[in-house]
Image (cartoon, rainbow, N blue to C red):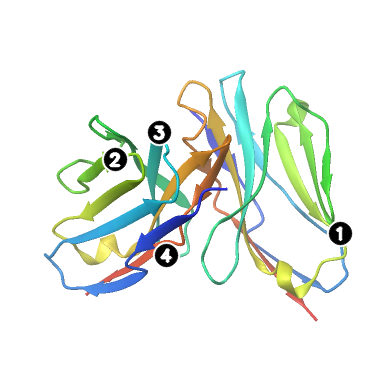
Amino acid sequence: AQKVTQAQTEISVVEKEDVTLDCVYETRDTTYYLFWYKQPPSGELVFLIRRNSFDEQNEISGRYSWNFQKSTSSFNFTITASQVVDSAVYFCALSEAQRGYSTLTFGKGTMLLVSP
Amino acid sequence: SAVISQKPSRDICQRGTSLTIQCQVDSQVTMMFWYRQQPGQSLTLIATANQGSEATYESGFVIDKFPISRPNLTFSTLTVSNMSPEDSSIYLCSVEDFEKLFFGSGTQLSVL
């Protein structure tokens, strides 16, 4: 069965610090997608990234970067030079080809608090 | 990206009543999904709704409790029936658009 573990329930940093959010997943499927979503206090889920299981290249988008390592079943998310606006709950999620690519299993989320 | 509108944004309901949540998308989509986010918890998929067929429910969710309609390719409703305080959650609809899954802003439901 598929499972996503976000061991960090809450992280507090000071603005401009770098922070890494961990995500470990379990799946028996060889074809799957991994996602990160941001949920700010307003409640709306904001799509950040989708990565398929065949693409292990790391990705950078502005201050955001993602490290996908199949060997450790991890898909970690790093925010560089954090800002107060980064304060939110971040969810990692997994979808498997067998269940349908849009059927997501979410982790419990990591609440990130960035203070000025 | 698809624009998703959900109504109502929040509601307070009495035990034993039912609430219907609407989800409208600004483009035609094949599949729509309904998720539940219980207080302080992660999101759990309730069901997948395809136009023209019965919704497919995940383990732990049944049609009698969460009936879903999907009358066309841009609209769906989720009804939370015979509500109890345990149904207090945020309910979100989502759609796939260009291989990305987008979510509506959610309906925050409180059951007294």
Place residue B108 in its image quadrant. Answer: bottom left
Task: Check disc 4 and report its element: helix, strand or loop.
Answer: loop
Where residue A49 sits in the image (x, y, percent)?
68, 44
| Closer to the eye: label 4 or 1 | 1
Tell which tag, 3 or 1, sits nearer the viewer.
Answer: 3
Q: CA distance from mark 3 to mark 1?
A: 37 Å
Drawn side of residue A114 relative to residue B71, left or right: right
Q: In the rendered structure, which disc, 2 or 4, sits on the residue that comes first in sequence? A: 4
How packed is label 3: few (under 14 Cα within 10 Å), some, or many (20 or more)? some
Mark 1 element type = loop
Q: Which residue is mark 4?
A: B39
Which image quarter is the C terminus of chain A in? bottom right
Determine whether B1 is above or below B86 in the image.
Answer: above
Callout 2 and callout 1 share a chain? no
**Picture layout, residue B40 above or below residue A34:** below
Callouts 4 and 1 in the same chain? no
- Choose between A69 and B46: the one closer to the eye: B46
- Give the image location of residue A55, x and y in percent: 76, 26
Q: On what subunit does the disc labeled 3 rest?
A: B
What numbered label is drawn on residue A116? none
- Depth check: B31 or A5 in front? B31
Visible residue check, residue A92: yes
Q: Residue furthest bottom?
A: A116
Identify residue type, mark 1.
Thr
Looking at the image, tell me whether mark 3 or mark 4 is earlier in sequence order.
3
Closest to the camera, between mark 3 and mark 4, is 3
According to the picture, the residue beneath numbered tag 2 turns out to be: B72
Left or right: where B80 falls relative to A34: left
Task: Count residues near mark 4 (Cα–Cα under 10 Å), then give few for <14, some for 14-19, many for 20+.
Answer: few
The Cα–Cα distance between marks 2 and 4, rounded to whole angstroms, is 31 Å
